[in-house]
Image (cartoon, helix red, strand yellow):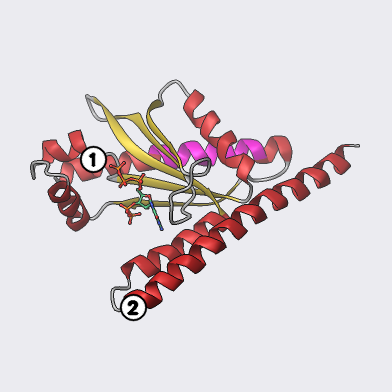
Amino acid sequence: MNELMAYYRCAIMEVETKFNVLNEEFSLEYDRNPIETIKTRLKSTESIIKKLVRRNFPLTVDSIEANLNDIAGVRVVCSFLEDIYLLADCLLQQDDVKLIQVKDYIKNPKPNGYRSLHLIIEIPIFLKDERKDMRVEVQLRTIAMDFWASLDHKLSYKKDIPEEEAKLLRQELLECAQISADLDVRMGEIKNRIVNKENT
Ligand code: 0O2
């Protein structure tokens, strides 16, 4: 288990570096950074066990590698919507990156209003005398989507809110998701108008 977790940590480092390289290149070429922040996390043993049990998978180390795609997580937060797809394309073009699954919760938001682009990718890590292909879940979202998701996360972990109140809060959050989606579009349009003015 310790070995497997170390491999996932290496995979996280590889993916984080790829995004840092892209950010650096964009900064040189266009004089702006598409990435605001990169957050990484390794799923805790407790969450791994819960997920295996929930999905009726065997509780073994091999089963973790075979059945779970989100042990290694990299979350990339961008200012603008278009940067999400630009970065995703740049990542997926790289010849050591294999796309396993795309979940586009921006084009198809979850019923609660959650939006983000999720990619499950496989990338190699090179050990002393072996190459291992590791799966990593990459979540790309805007600052507004991240802001929304962290509040939603807070609500879903608060178990002591009366159901009636929780229902109202979920409804409010759904409305805020729409407002923040509109804001993302408008901010992108303003940015493009500014860029176009600079270029004329
Ligand atoms: P944490 O703490 O972020 O790790 P799959 O993994 O594909 O078999 P799953 O788990 O439904 O199935 O995957 P999905 O839908 O791609 O979502 C996985 C992750 O996306 C979650 O991880 C969250 O990080 C985020 N996410 C998805 N839906 C929501 C949502 O409605 N609200 C918020 N705030 N985040 C969401 P974990 O493992 O749940 O948590």
Relative placement, left or right, of 40 versus 141 is left
Q: Quadrant of the N terminus?
A: top left
Judging by the rendered image, the residue that carries numbered circle 2 is 161
Residue 134 location, x and y as percent?
A: 29, 33
Query: Is the CB atom of the residue marked by disc 1 within 8 angstroms of ligand 1's nearest atom?
Result: yes
State which region is magenta: 14-26
Q: Is residue 125 magenta?
A: no
The kind of secondary structure the magenta stretch mainly shows is helix
Residue 135 location, x and y as percent?
A: 30, 35
Task: Report the amino acid beneath label 2.
Answer: Ile
The answer to which of 107 and 197 lies nearer the viewer is 107
Judging by the rendered image, the residue that carries numbered circle 1 is 68
Residue drawn at x 51%, y 39% as measured from the top left: 19
Furthest toward the front, the residue is 164
Q: Is residue 20 magenta?
A: yes
Of the numbered discs 2 and 1, the one sitting upstream in the chain is 1
Disc 1 crowd rating (10 Å Cα; few below 14, some 14-19, many 20+) is some
